[in-house]
Structure formats: structure tokens, C-alpha cells
Image: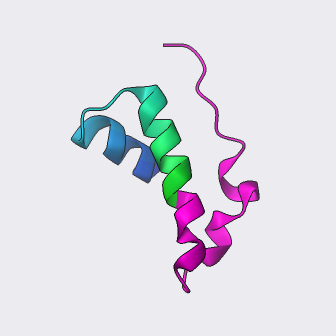
Amino acid sequence: MFTITFFKHHIEEGISKEDALRQTKLDFIKMRNDREHSYFSEPYFWSPFILYGE
């Protein structure tokens, strides 16, 4: 789910990888209010992802 959201931001919206990663993490944090997916807002699910290289 994280990777799909990341590439959606990066490819479909045409933003940089850095901004796509940041926006994806913010999207997951905002899931706190989504009853069905609220557990994804925990850092356990999104914090391991980092950008390395170009």
C-alpha cells in the first residue's frame, strides 16, 4: 500500500521523489481518522521507508 501511494504521487502527479515520500508519509499519518485503516497511521508502518540515491 505504501509503495503504491508513493508511486502514485511521484509518477501520476509528477512531483519529486523526496516530495512524494514526504506526502505519502503524511497521507499515512492522516489515516488516523479513517476507521478502516487507522492502524496505518502508526510510524511502524511508514517510518522504515527512506530515499536512498537519486
The x and y percentages for residue 42 are 71, 63
Residue 4 vertical placement versus 13 (above, below): below
Direction bottom: furthest residue: 35
Magenta segment includes 48: yes
Q: In this view, does 15 lie above or below 52?
A: below
Q: Which residue lies furthest to the right in this view?
A: 44
Instruction: Specify the quadrant of the image occupied by residue 35.
Output: bottom right
Residue 12 colored magenta?
A: no
Q: Could you tell whether 54 is left or right of 10 in the image?
A: right
User: Can you say whether 23 is above or below 33 in the image?
Assistant: above
Name the one closer to the observer, 22 or 2: 22
The answer to whether residue 41 is visible is: yes
Q: Is residue 16 left or right of residue 37?
A: left
Q: Residue at the location (33% across, 47% down)?
A: 8
User: In front here: 28 or 53?
Assistant: 28
Please tell me how many numbered marks the rendered image carries. Answer: 0
- The location of residue 28, given as percent across then percent down, is 55, 60
Whether residue 27 sits left or right of residue 51 in the image: it is left
Name the image colouring.
rainbow
Q: Decide if residue 37 is in sight here.
A: no
Residue lying at 67% horizontally and 73% vertically, measured from the top left: 39
Relative to 40, does residue 54 appear above or below in the rendering?
Answer: above
The residue at the far top in this view is: 54
Instruction: Determine the image quadrant of residue 29.
Output: bottom right
Q: Which of 31 and 51 is in front in this view?
A: 31
Magenta segment range? Answer: 28-54
Residue 13 horizontal/vertical position (percent): 24, 41
